[in-house]
């Protein structure tokens, strides 16, 4: 494999920097406008402020921040739903696909992907693009004493890693004493997801999308301690670590020696090519290469960079952002409102014209005194009224605000207000749907990027997660799914997609209105609804506290969940006198329809079925007992003996 020199790597980095240099001015200004510093302009590579007289008003009415945050909130209103596709119809692959979905559900919380998705989407709103970098970090995770053989973790017959506490169990004491096996404290490793800005990613200039790039270079400032832990070298601090991206381009009077320093770490990812058939991963620090290996030895699976875009530009790698389009109207809005404020200050502190022949002492505070030569005798001081602003200037504010709404796609209905003259609910829903549809392409692109990220996470788990780890997934009503996981359990079922439209924003008010109508119809027609379903219905209604009306159902559900877990482990459980048999039978039968019950051994299934049958038998006994007893108020009278009447003689009989 041919080696790339530092000079060649720096040459590729310079070409990529030059290709996007024209766009960086917009990115810096967008960040400054978002932060509220909007009376600025780009001046030869830095952000500068205009020199204005002290009396000029520089008012800022920041509309960019709420627009960016609202658009991000609408994109992330609903959590995306991952769906795994099994490799085949075999039971093992079906179980592997189901496990893949659970792993992604676990990693969504474990890797804090919700907050990282919010941050990367905010980068895309401000600069047009944001990136995730997904890789395996061998320095993360808890450390443990592992048995090593030839500098590799030793495995037992079941292909499990052997820790120090299992040496005696496996009879490896002699080998350890003879130094054929050694113990070493190493970290377990874990997946890492870094959020990168477009200032830190330098792709192949010929690429039009991240996956088309033949190579990608990343430049990030790290601490000296990070470099020592990750690469084992003492690096020289050669880069500034500013407090912000935009702030780094603003003029400052401080000394450069006061800036906190870091180490510039540059990484090269190259696809397999004629020059590098196995691909290439290279890292250089302080102009020295510290890593130069094929991709098979790298912590990556495929391209580790996931790109999230705002508004793609055909034929260009770097997309544009809504913030770039809003900067012009935002500047005009600030200027006009500043002019109105200046005019109001002039009216409140009117200037005074005083004739020099008036022979009057007048201070004119507040306001300015203007002396002039007047040829008329007995001149009287008078106020100088500034001209009113033309009507079209005041109307310009409405036009600018309408322009901001059109560019951002956030109209009145998206801000919980109704346009003038619109009263029909159907019309309001159509307007709301139109604003949501405007985000459709961006959300679809986000779902595609998340699907690629899910594939990377599963592939990294399958390759590097070679030890047993406990996975805990919290469910509803205290239900926890706890199981051991290893990468080989996925069975190469690492192909996942994000369910189309699952991240699209949906109106909570419209959802509640539809649920209310259906519930009223069910009650009106006398439908018998299970209390369990009513409680789930009220929980989905998303009004806190309503589901507490059926709090007793929660206790029954939690009890059934605990029983299901014990029964599937093969523990026999007796039924209780206080159990609700109908509820327990229905809940246990739901569990028997699950894939978890199918995977249980036959002995556990038999114990499970015996427990359900016990509930059924007691229910039958209760029904029989009720049938034998009379209804209330209809108790039978105790039996009475017939009254004996003595015989009477015939009056006509002879005496």
Image (cartoon, helix red, strand yellow):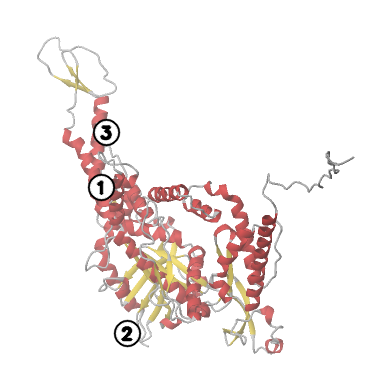
Residue nearest the viewer, comparing 654 with 206: 654
How many labels, in total? 3
Q: Secondary structure at mark 1?
A: helix
Residue farthest to the right? 655
Q: Which mark is residue 162?
A: none
Q: Which mark is residue 273?
A: 2
Front tag of 3 and 1:
1
Horizontally, residue 642 falls left or right of residue 384, namely right
Marks 2 and 3, how far apart at CA: 63 Å
In which image quadrant can residue 484 be found? bottom right
Q: Which residue is mark 1?
A: 404
Pick the quarter of the image with the C terminus: top right
Indicate the position of residue 37 as horizontal and vertical percent values.
33, 47
Horizontally, residue 539 falls left or right of residue 168, namely left
User: Within 10 Å of the Cα at label 1, are there few (<14), some (14-19), or many (20+) other Cα atoms?
Assistant: many
Q: Secondary structure at mark 2?
A: loop
């Amino acid at each position: 494999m041919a080696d790339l020199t530092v000079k060649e790597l720096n040459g590729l980095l310079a070409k990529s920097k030059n290709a996007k240099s024209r766009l960086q001015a917009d990115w810096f200004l967008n960040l400054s406008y978002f932060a509220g510093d909007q009376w600025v302009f780009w001046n030869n590579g830095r952000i500068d402020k205009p020199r204005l007289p002290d009396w000029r008003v520089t008012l800022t009415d920041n509309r960019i921040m709420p627009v960016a945050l609202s658009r991000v909130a609408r994109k992330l209103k609903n959590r995306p739903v991952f769906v795994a596709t099994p490799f085949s119809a075999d039971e093992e692959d079906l179980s592997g696909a189901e496990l893949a979905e659970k792993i992604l559900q676990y990693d969504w919380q474990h890797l804090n992907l919700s907050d990282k998705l919010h941050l990367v989407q905010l980068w895309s709103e401000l600069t047009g693009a944001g990136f995730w970098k997904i890789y395996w970090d061998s320095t993360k995770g808890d450390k443990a004493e592992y048995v090593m053989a030839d500098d590799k973790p030793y495995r037992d017959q079941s292909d499990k890693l052997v820790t120090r506490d299992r040496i005696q169990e496996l009879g490896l004491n002699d080998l350890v004493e003879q130094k054929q096996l050694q113990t070493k404290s190493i970290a377990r490793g874990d997946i890492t997801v870094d959020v990168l800005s477009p200032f830190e990613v330098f792709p192949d200039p010929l690429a039009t999308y991240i996956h088309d790039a033949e190579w990608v270079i990343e430049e990030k400032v790290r601490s000296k301690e990070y470099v020592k832990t990750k690469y084992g070298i003492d690096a020289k601090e050669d880069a500034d670590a500013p407090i912000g991206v935009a702030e780094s381009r603003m003029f400052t009077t401080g000394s450069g020696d006061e800036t906190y320093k870091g180490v510039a770490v540059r990484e090269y990812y190259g696809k397999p090519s004629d020059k590098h058939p196995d691909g290439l991963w290279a890292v250089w620090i302080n102009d020295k290469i510290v890593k130069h290996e094929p991709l098979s030895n790298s912590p990556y699976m495929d391209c580790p960079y996931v790109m999230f875009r705002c508004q793609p530009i055909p034929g260009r790698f770097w997309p544009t952002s809504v913030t770039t389009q809003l900067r012009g109207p935002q500047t005009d809005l600030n200027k006009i409102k500043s002019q109105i404020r200046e005019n109001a200050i002039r009216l409140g502190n009117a200037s005074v014209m005083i004739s020099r022949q008036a022979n009057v002492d007048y201070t004119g505070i507040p306001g300015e005194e203007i002396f002039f030569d007047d040829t008329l005798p007995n001149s009287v001081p008078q106020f100088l009224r500034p001209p009113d602003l033309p009507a079209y200037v005041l109307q310009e504010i409405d036009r600018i605000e309408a322009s901001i709404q059109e560019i951002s796609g956030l109209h009145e209905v998206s801000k919980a207000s109704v346009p003038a003259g619109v009263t029909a609910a159907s019309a309001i829903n159509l307007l709301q749907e139109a604003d949501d549809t405007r985000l459709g392409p961006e959300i679809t692109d986000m779902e595609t990027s998340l699907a690629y990220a899910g594939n990377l996470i599963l592939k990294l788990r399958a390759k590097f997660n070679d030890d047993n780890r406990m996975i805990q997934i919290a469910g509803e009503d205290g239900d926890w799914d706890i199981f051991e996981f290893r990468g080989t359990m996925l069975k190469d079922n690492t192909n996942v997609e994000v369910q189309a439209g699952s991240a699209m924003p949906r109106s909570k008010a419209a959802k509640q209105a539809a649920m209310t109508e259906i519930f009223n119809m069910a009650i009106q027609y006398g439908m018998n609804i299970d209390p369990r379903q009513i409680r789930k219905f009220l929980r989905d209604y998303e009004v806190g506290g309503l589901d507490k009306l059926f709090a007793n159902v929660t206790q029954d559900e939690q009890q059934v969940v605990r029983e299901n877990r014990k029964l599937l482990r093969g523990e026999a459980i007796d039924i209780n006198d206080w159990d609700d048999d109908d509820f327990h039978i229905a809940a246990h039968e739901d569990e028997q329809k699950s894939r978890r019950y199918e995977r249980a051994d036959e002995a556990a299934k038999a114990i499970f079925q015996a427990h359900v049958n016990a509930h059924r038998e007691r229910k039958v006994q209760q029904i029989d007992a009720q049938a034998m007893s009379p209804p209330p108020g209809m108790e039978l009278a105790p039996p009475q003996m017939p009254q004996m009447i003595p015989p009477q003689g015939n009056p006509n009989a002879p005496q």
